[in-house]
Amino acid sequence: MDNNRNIDDLSEVEYENLVKDYETTKISINDLIAKYKLDPSCKKFGFYNAFTRYIKTKLGCPNCGARLYREVFPRKTDRRVVYKCFECTHSDVPYCQCDFCRDVRAKELERHRELLEQEQAEEEKRKQEELLKQAYYRAHLIDYLKDQSNQTEFFSFYDLSLEDQIAISSICSKATLIDNTGVLISFELQPGIKENFFPQTEKFELWLEQAFKNRLISVDPHSKIDAFIFNDGSLKIDLNKVNFKIMIKELYDSENYDENLKKIRTMCFSYPETDSFVNNVKELWHEIGYQEIVYYINYRLKLINPKFEEYIPTLKIERCIRSLFKSGVSIGKIQALIHGAVSSTTSYLPNINENLPHIKNHLIFMIEKKAKELLNDHNRFKNAPRDYRICQSDISYIFFNIFLGMDSDKNPNIINETPCNDEVIRSLLQNKKTRNEDSLDEIQFI
Ligand SMILES: [Zn+2]
Ligand SMILES: [Zn+2]
């Protein structure tokens, strides 16, 4: 028998045995050459490269199901071996060129193209919708601003309700007005202003909303464009960015502007002493007093623990505090009540950091309890002095100090100490007449 055979000369069975020996044993190449009587020159270009035939496997072709054939596993490297189907020419390489794989890839490409087209169409549609929306918004905004600038109905300051007068007077005293008109520079450019008009900013925003509905306040059409926001198809105004316009005719009378502004700031008008007006004053006193008390409760709670959330009185507590005002109790006595309720809460519950809701509940309980005592006996508490750490709100200042003329320079506790009743109000209004006459003289000199 020929001792110098090529691997190609081996029979099917011999070839399979050689591959088995090569792949699964450690018989050296030289011993394999000897064992299978091969020509030693067959390892000239690497023994592995002499294997040219594929080995039949037990695996089926994924395309046609015929048996797959594979290359011989190399001994030294972990090179990936190729599996091949001789029926349909499929092999497990990327970009196999068999009909089946080409077809699969073509279909995938088509699907990809369709998806891309679909995405492009959707993007196009979205852009169109956005453009339409923008056009709609612009038209809507123009209509809105036209409506605002077409507002020609102006109010006379004196005809406003006392509450609106106090609010407008506060705004005119503290906020910056543009070019001798009633147009306000946006609150954004006057930081801190909006927060001090009312004891609570939310109350000011509620007032603003109402004034807006009543057209006492309108929007200046020259406001910055980003003061207008479209949300859910409707136009919203950014309270901080818009320029508000106060619709008071006295503020658009250029000849008498300075004098009018001064009269508004000093509330220098003659008010009737009728029962109904005295009643209006009383109600506003109660309202401002009530808001100051709620502010005071929050202030005290924050002193106990800054983590306390904003306290909003329950209806029961609100009624309770308001009924104290109605019974003629002064602000100072109600503050003393709150002070007492807070003190007994903190001494009763010394671990003030532990259970905030518990503290709040106890405080509410104490406020109710002490309010009943104060209702039964107005002398149950002494007036608490004004707490200088608390900044007086603008409406409180305009109402008590300017409108009612309570001179807190002479007596710092006058607002806290004065009980709210008809007699007191009448005498304050009486004094106001004299003060007005003095300041009118003063105005005429300007
Ligand atoms: Zn196949
Ligand atoms: Zn293929």
Image (cartoon, rainbow, N blue to C red):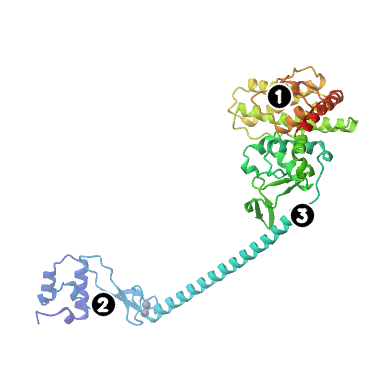
Residue 43 visible here: yes
The number of numbered discs placed on residues in the rendered structure image is: 3
Residue located 53% across and 69% down the image: 119
Contact, mark 1 vs mark 2 (Cβ under 8 Å): no
Of callouts 3 and 1, the N-terminal one: 3
Q: Name the quadrant where ligand 1 sits.
A: bottom left
Where is residue 145, by image quadrant? Answer: bottom right
- Secondary structure type for disc 2: loop
Q: Which residue is mark 1?
A: 338
Which one is nearer the viewer's eye here, 209 or 28?
209
Label 3 CA crowd tier, 10 Å (few <14, some 14–19, many 20+): few
Quarter occupied by residue 172: top right
Q: Residue 234: percent from the left, percent from the top? A: 69, 56
Q: Point out the frontmost of discs 2 and 3.
A: 3
Q: Is residue 53 above or below residue 336?
A: below
Marks 3/1: CA distance?
49 Å
Quadrant for the C terminus, please.
Answer: top right
- The secondary element bearing badge 3 is classed as loop
Which residue is painted at 68% across and 47% down in the image?
243
Q: Which residue is mark 3?
A: 150
Q: State the separation of the CA atoms marked 1 and 2.
A: 97 Å
Farthest residue, direction right: 274
Dot 2 surroundings within 10 Å: few (below 14), some, or many (20 or more)?
A: some
Disc 2 target residue: 54
